Image (cartoon, rainbow, N blue to C red):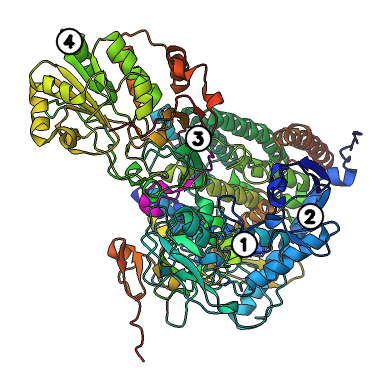
């Protein structure tokens, strides 16, 4: 029992460590990537003992700065809620990772360890629940600030998140119908199957339309460009206008965490999670007949690498989108959500259902 | 009466008038360096060239008497060509000193060059070197290089002051202005040569490098140095306190008034403005024992209380000053003499200064005639008031401006504050009397307030405010009106203009005058006083 | 005035689809990204130095070349003996639209020079760098060619240049020692007159 707990704690620690560092690393990537896109150089100072590391220490400097800055709480703010809101945001973004399987089961002696912090059979629902709860951080921040602009920003953000959740959810139903499970572990395992003997049955292959809807809605869900108008830092003023210091920093962090969550989810649901094409637990089985046997450790490492690479590519893509697209207007945002994505998702669902019926496969 | 045409306009002038004067009457300005209306005609600068029809050559307007049927062109091509040539000669040896020259900005050489100069000089030779920065006397500096030998200054010292210090020595391009050997330019009107010098050859040593003339603001007023009341322009620096050691007034220039001082001003009046910025009283001072801060409100409250507390109006004494304007003297009379029955006088023991038969008068205050017209002279005597005060017959004594120690002697003056319940001093500058008084009220200098003076010759002239009062000081009329309000006196005037209207209605000599009717030249309201003082 | 009605252009179906447009946008950003990434990597190994991988100028280390007409911090030019060429004519003080120049003239021992500035202060916190002072100077005594752009200070007072910094652009506040040997008033000595003219050479 103790060992089980320790293993779980270790896994949780690993995920925490990895995800939080990745979020910090994201700030650097964001700076450098935007700089390259815009023919600039990007942040390259903040040396530590003379080492600049391409400006990688700027993230650390940012955190130090945010911790040492004055924490201003408006006079008219609800002090408790004002303090709680950023914690809500970060908390729900972090716990969403618990249900995401990030590697194949590791076998150590007799013990089989699932590389997943919490093995929940309704994992997908859990992740969505957590992402939805994130809206509390937003609305609380807007509401508790005692600032009209903040509450308007909070309301905009809430409306946006709730609207896009619907399209997001419906888009995934198709995937669920095809694989017949909402356990993410099984979903990933199920995507290892081959279609017609050579094509991995990844979500992107069987549900391409759902993938696009998912990515779009997920971007809106994370409130990143081109859907970042709830924040609209300098122009329309967002829900965290009254936050300063590390509390602001936590909202900032949430932003990056949610990006990573969404990237992980997209990987898990549409790109086979930790699956490597043609790799089974005992080795590669290529359709043209080659076979390369691997042991369990290599198998696990390859799975981890696969998951990481896919997730990072998504992060990179989201970042690239951010620096490519201009922001939507609020009415355009709502139009796209309700009149664009939602009907397409429904049609996609119906078509999927009809096709499944005609193919007659049970799951 | 010859009729002539100048620039197409006809005018009829008395015989003997010169063309330049006739043109002036038409408002046509002809450039001039050597010509000065107050001096004899020299005709040596040649800049005033005009074209006269039927004359083969250009003529100098300053020395050309008018004739009937004369047709003069002052702006024709020929005339301007002539002036351009004259200027070229004048500038042949004139140094390009303008940036460092004090005259620059009010220099006729600059001005006329701008109008019709030869902008592309043809003079390639070395300019003559002469002496620069020669001290001629206590007030005047000479730069021989800049001199264009117009001889205005020579004629001034020959004809006006008749001291004859100046002369032009040598010939040709070696000719230079200078003093006769052994002479020093220190006559009482010496600095007038600076005003009449059309270029920067003669400059004021006191004004030297203090400011540039274009920084100065100018306000017309009247000199308060003596009872002549010469008209002056006060030149002051409204901003730029880094110049002139922070003092506002920079210099005084005479203002033309045909009836008073013509173009001239004595050096005594010209350099007698230092007190306007130095040693001024800037704040109300109260009794030392009084812990409360001394402000105008507390001061006036204490004074009005003491005045109302006096058992009899006659136990209040006022020694007014002939430095005050007519309006203020009128207010003093109305408040203290008419309403309170106090003893008021402006006549103090006389201490005549130097005088001459030109401008300088022995009476060194500007408004003695005004005080006389208002009945404040001779009716009582300051000496008597002080003696009565020392005898304990007065409770309150208010001294305007006067230095009691100087007038009544150290011994008497020192006793005053002990014998009186209240001794008030109001004045512009620090003095020994100010240290004696219980209350010291800082008042505005005459250039800081509106009002009128009546000069020695019975001429009513207006002094205008050039700039606001120094520090916390206030105009005397404002102080007196505030006091009247505190004493509940029914005086409803709102400023010097209205006070003057009341004054003019009350006093016959002032007739129906108003400020607008006085104008800038003043109005004679009383017969000229012929050296009456014995 | 005739009103010209401009219709908002209708989007074509292709544009309304949005995804192709996103593709076009991504094409551009990816092109820049990979081109610059490649150039940066090439620079790391010392290749393709001629191609810049960004328009950024790394300011304190790398300076942009200044135009010869560029107006930077002022300086006072000097005579051969090290005294300022300025004759204290105050034309710059007069022409200055920001009123940031303060000159107090003094009497020069040479009557052919007459004037010189005992105080010459420029308040850079007020200066608008219009260059009128340079243009108006009859003696070429003030120039704006030091190339100093980074005028910054922690206080308003430190933005005021006195004759020390104007004579020697390398000096920075606070000036501790007064090395100028011509007469002048400076803050180092509390606004008193310092220095003297060299003694006239006796033949």
Residue at the location (43% across, 30% down)?
B528
Q: Numbered disc 1: what chain?
A: B
Q: Is residue B2 left or right of residue A45?
A: right
Percent of width and height locating residue B203: 47, 61
Q: How many residues crowd around disc 2 within 10 Å: few (fewer than 14), some, or many (20 or more)? A: some
Q: Which residue is mark 3?
A: A137
Percent of width and height locating residue C88: 47, 65
Q: Which residue is mark 1?
A: B109
- Dividing the image into 4 quarters, which one contains the C terminus of chain B? top left
Circle nearer the viewer, 1 or 4: 1
In the image, residue A39 sits, relative to residue C199, either above or below, namely above
Both marks 3 and 1 on one chain? no
Q: Which residue is mark 4?
A: B309
Circle nearer the viewer, 4 or 2: 2
| Viewer-proximal residue among A295 and A9 | A9
Q: Secondary structure at mark 3?
A: helix
Q: What's drawn in magenta, residue-wise?
A: B240-258
In the image, residue A287 sits, relative to residue B530, either above or below, namely below
What is the C-alpha distance between the residues marked 3 and 1? Answer: 82 Å
Is B256 a magenta residue? yes
Q: Numbered disc 2: what chain?
A: B
Q: Is residue C10 left or right of residue C98?
A: right
Percent of width and height locating residue C104: 42, 60
Disc nearer the start of the sequence (1/4): 1
Which labelled disc corresponds to residue C94?
none
Q: Numbered disc 4: what chain?
A: B
Circle nearer the viewer, 3 or 1: 1
Q: Is residue B93 left or right of residue B371?
A: right
Q: Which residue is mark 2?
A: B75
- Dividing the image into 4 quarters, which one contains the N terminus of chain B? top right
Both marks 4 and 2 on one chain? yes
What is the C-alpha distance between the residues marked 2 and 3? Answer: 87 Å
């Amino acid at each position: 029992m103790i060992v089980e707990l320790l293993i779980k704690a270790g896994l949780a620690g690993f995920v925490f460590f990895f995800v939080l560092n990745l979020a910090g690393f994201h700030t650097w990537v964001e700076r450098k990537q935007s700089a390259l896109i815009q023919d600039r150089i990007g942040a390259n100072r903040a040396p530590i003992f003379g080492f600049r590391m391409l400006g990688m220490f700027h993230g650390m400097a940012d955190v130090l700065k945010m911790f040492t800055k004055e924490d201003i709480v408006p006079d008219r703010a609800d002090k408790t809620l004002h303090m709680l809101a950023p914690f809500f945001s970060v908390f729900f973004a972090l716990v969403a990772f618990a249900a995401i399987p990030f590697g194949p089961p590791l076998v150590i002696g007799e013990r089989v360890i699932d590389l997943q912090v919490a093995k929940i059979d309704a994992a997908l629902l859990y992740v969505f629940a957590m992402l939805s709860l994130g809206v509390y951080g937003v609305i609380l921040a807007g509401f508790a600030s005692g600032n009209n602009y903040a509450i308007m920003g909070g309301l905009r953000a809430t409306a946006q998140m709730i609207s896009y959740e619907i399209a997001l959810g419906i888009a995934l139903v198709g995937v669920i119908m095809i694989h017949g499970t909402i356990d993410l572990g099984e979903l990933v395992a199920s995507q290892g199957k081959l279609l017609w003997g050579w094509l991995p049955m990844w979500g992107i292959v069987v549900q391409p339309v759902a993938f696009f809807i998912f990515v779009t809605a997920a971007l809106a869900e994370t409130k990143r460009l081109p859907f970042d108008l709830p924040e609209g830092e300098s122009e329309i003023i967002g829900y965290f206008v009254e936050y300063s210091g590390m509390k602001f920093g936590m909202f900032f962090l949430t932003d990056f965490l949610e990006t990573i969550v969404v990237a992980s989810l997209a990987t898990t649901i549409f790109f086979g999670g930790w699956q490597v094409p043609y790799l089974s637990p005992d080795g590669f089985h290529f359709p043209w007949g080659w076979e390369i046997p691997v042991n369990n450790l290599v198998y696990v490492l390859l799975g981890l690498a696969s998951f990481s690479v896919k997730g990072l590519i998504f992060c990179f893509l989201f970042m690239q989108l951010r620096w490519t697209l201009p922001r939507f207007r609020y009415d355009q945002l709502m139009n796209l959500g309700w009149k664009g994505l939602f009907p397409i998702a429904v049609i996609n669902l119906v078509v999927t259902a009809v096709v499944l019926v005609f193919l007659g496969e049970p799951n | 009466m010859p009729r002539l045409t100048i620039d197409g306009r006809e005018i009829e002038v008395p015989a003997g008038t010169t063309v330049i004067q006739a043109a002036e009457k038409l408002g046509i300005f002809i450039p001039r360096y050597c010509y000065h209306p107050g001096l004899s005609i020299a005709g040596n600068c040649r800049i005033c060239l005009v074209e006269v029809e039927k004359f083969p050559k250009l003529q100098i307007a300053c020395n050309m008497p008018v004739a009937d049927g004369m047709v003069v062109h002052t702006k024709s091509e020929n005339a301007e060509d002539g002036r351009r040539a004259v200027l070229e000669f004048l500038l042949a040896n004139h140094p390009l000193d303008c940036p460092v020259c004090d005259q620059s900005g009010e220099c006729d050489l600059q001005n006329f060059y701008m109008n019709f100069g030869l902008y592309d000089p043809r003079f390639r030779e070395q300019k003559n070197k002469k002496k620069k920065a020669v001290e001629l006397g206590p007030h005047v500096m000479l730069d021989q290089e800049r001199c264009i030998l117009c001889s205005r200054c020579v004629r001034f010292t020959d004809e006006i002051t008749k001291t004859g210090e100046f002369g032009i020595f040598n010939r040709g391009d070696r000719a230079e202005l200078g003093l006769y050997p052994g002479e020093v330019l220190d006559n009482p009107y010496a600095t007038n040569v600076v005003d009449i010098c059309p270029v920067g050859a003669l400059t004021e040593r006191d004004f030297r490098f203090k400011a540039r003339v274009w920084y100065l603001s100018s306000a017309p007023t009247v000199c308060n140095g003596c009872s002549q009341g010469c008209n002056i322009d006060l030149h002051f620096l409204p901003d730029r306190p880094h110049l002139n050691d922070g003092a506002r007034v920079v210099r005084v220039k005479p203002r033309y008034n045909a009836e008073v001082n013509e173009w001239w001003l004595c050096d005594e009046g010209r350099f007698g403005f230092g007190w306007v910025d130095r040693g001024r009283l800037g704040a109300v001072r109260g009794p030392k024992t009084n812990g409360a801060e001394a402000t105008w409100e507390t001061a006036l409250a204490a004074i009005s209380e003491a005045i109302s507390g006096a058992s009899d109006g006659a136990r209040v004494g006022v020694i007014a000053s002939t430095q005050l304007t007519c309006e203020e003297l009128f207010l003093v009379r109305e408040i203290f003499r008419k309403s309170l029955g106090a003893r008021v006088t402006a006549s103090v023991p006389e201490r005549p200064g130097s005088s001459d038969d030109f401008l300088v008068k022995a009476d060194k205050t500007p408004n003695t005639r005004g005080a006389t017209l208002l009945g404040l002279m001779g009716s009582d005597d300051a000496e008597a008031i002080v003696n009565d005060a020392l005898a304990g017959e007065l409770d309150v004594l208010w001294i305007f401006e006067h230095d009691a120690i100087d007038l009544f002697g150290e011994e008497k003056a020192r006793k005053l504050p002990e014998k009186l319940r209240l001794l008030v001093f109001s004045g512009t500058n620090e003095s020994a009397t100010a240290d004696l008084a219980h209350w010291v009220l800082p008042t505005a200098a005459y250039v800081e307030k509106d009002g009128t003076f009546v000069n020695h010759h019975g001429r009513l002239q207006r002094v205008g405010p050039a700039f606001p009062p120094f520090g916390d000081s206030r105009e005397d009329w404002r102080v007196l009106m505030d006091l009247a309000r505190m004493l509940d006196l029914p005086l409803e005037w709102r400023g010097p203009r209205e006070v003057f209207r009341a004054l003019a209605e009350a006093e016959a000599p002032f007739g129906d005058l108003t400020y607008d009717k006085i104008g800038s030249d003043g109005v004679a309201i009383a017969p000229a006083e012929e050296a009456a003082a014995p | 005035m005739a009103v010209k009605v401009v219709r908002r252009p209708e989007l074509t179906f292709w544009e309304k689809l949005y995804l192709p447009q996103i593709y076009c946008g991504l094409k551009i950003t990816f092109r820049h990204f990979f081109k610059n990434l490649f150039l940066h990597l090439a620079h790391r190994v010392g290749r393709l130095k001629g191609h810049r991988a960004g328009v950024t100028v790394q300011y304190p280390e790398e300076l942009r070349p200044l135009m010869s007409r560029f107006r930077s911090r002022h300086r006072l030019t000097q005579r051969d003996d090290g005294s300022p060429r300025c004759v204290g004519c105050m034309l710059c003080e007069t022409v200055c639209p920001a009123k940031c120049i303060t000159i107090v003239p003094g009497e020069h021992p040479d009557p052919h020079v007459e004037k010189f500035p005992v105080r010459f202060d420029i308040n850079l916190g007020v200066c608008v760098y219009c260059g009128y002072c340079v243009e108006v100077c009859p003696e070429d005594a003030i120039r704006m060619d030091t190339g100093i752009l980074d005028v910054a200070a922690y206080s308003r007072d430190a933005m005021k240049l006195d004759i020390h910094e104007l004579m020697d652009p390398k000096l920075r506040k606070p000036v501790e020692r007064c090395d100028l040997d011509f007469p002048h008033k400076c803050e180092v000595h509390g606004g008193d007159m310092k220095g003297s003219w060299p003694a006239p050479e006796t033949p």
